[in-house]
Image (cartoon, helix red, strand yellow):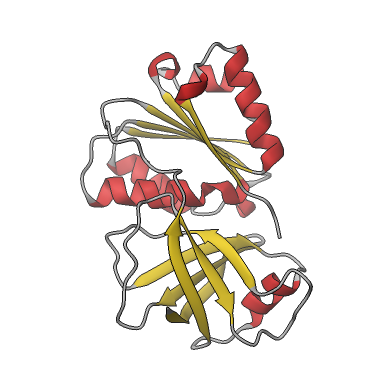
Amino acid sequence: MKAEISDKKEIAEGILWVKFDLLGKKIDFKPGQFFYIDLINPPYKDIKGNHRHFTIVNSPIESGIIEMTTRIRESAFKKSLFELAIGSEVEIDGPDGNFVLPDDASIPLVFITGGIGITPFISMLRFIQGNNLVYKVSLLYSNRNKKSTAFLKELESITKINPKIKLALTTIIDLDFIKQYAPDWQKSVFMLSGPPVMVQAMRGELEKLGVDKRKIKFEEFVGY
C-alpha cells in the first residue's frame, strides 16, 4: 500500500525515527512484528536495492500510522531514507514476524536488548500500557552511553507509572547483571533482541545458566 513520510527526526545519537501516514488505511499487527518498505525513486541506489524490513515501533492501538527507527548508516537505503522529504511516498507491506508477546500475561518476562534492538520492546511496552495489561517485565537495556539510548525518557516514564515494569540500563549485560535486575529469572520467559553477536552470546550464557531453550525467544537485527 502507498504511505507517505509524515515526520522524522534523530531521537538519539545516530538513531533516526520515521513516521508514515497510511493515507486512510491501516495495518493490523501484533507488537514486535515488522513491516516491509520500498523507497520510490530514492536519491541513492546500490546493488542491495530499495526493499528492506523494519520493526514497527508504535502500538497497534495507533491505527493509520507506522513508526520505525533505524541506526543512521552510509548505505544507499539509509542515506535515502534520511534525506527524503516529508510527504515523500513509499510502498509498505506486512506485517510479518513471530517475535511477539506470549499470550499468558502471568509469566514474568525478561527483555534483553542493546542499541536499536529496543524497537520491538517499545511497541510491546506501549501496547501493555495502552491496554492496562498485567505483564511483569524486566527490561535490561545496553548502550554505549545515554546520548545513544533511544526512547530513554519514555522508558523512564513508563517505569515510574507502572510498577510491574522495571528498567535497568548498562553498557554490558552479563549473568550477574541478569540475576540482579531480573530476580524472577528462574520462572521467566526471556526475549532477546539486538545485533546477532549479542543475541547469540546471551543465548549461550542463558543456556549455561540452565534456562530451558524453549523459554528463550530472540530476534536478530542485521545492519544494512
State the image coordinates of residue 194 (x, y, percent, origin top left): 61, 43
Q: Which residue shows up at 21% across the image and 49% down it? A: 131
Q: Quadrant of residue 42?
A: bottom right
Viewer-proximal residue, 9 or 128? 128
Up the image or down, 72 lies above or below 128; here it is: below
Residue at the image position 57 percent from the left and 87 percent from the top: 85
User: Is residue 34 shown to the viewer in this render?
Assistant: yes
Question: In the drawing, does residue 115 fall left or right of residue 32?
Answer: right
What x and y, as percent, mark residue 21?
39, 78
Image vertical order of residue 112 relative to residue 87, above or below = above
Q: Is residue 205 above or below residue 68?
A: above
Residue at 44% x, 53% y: name it.
Answer: 33
Q: Which residue is at the front of the view, 153 or 15?
A: 15
Left-right relation of 48 to 39: right
Q: Is residue 85 left or right of residue 14?
A: left
Q: Tell me where residue 39 appears, x and y as whole percent.
A: 60, 79
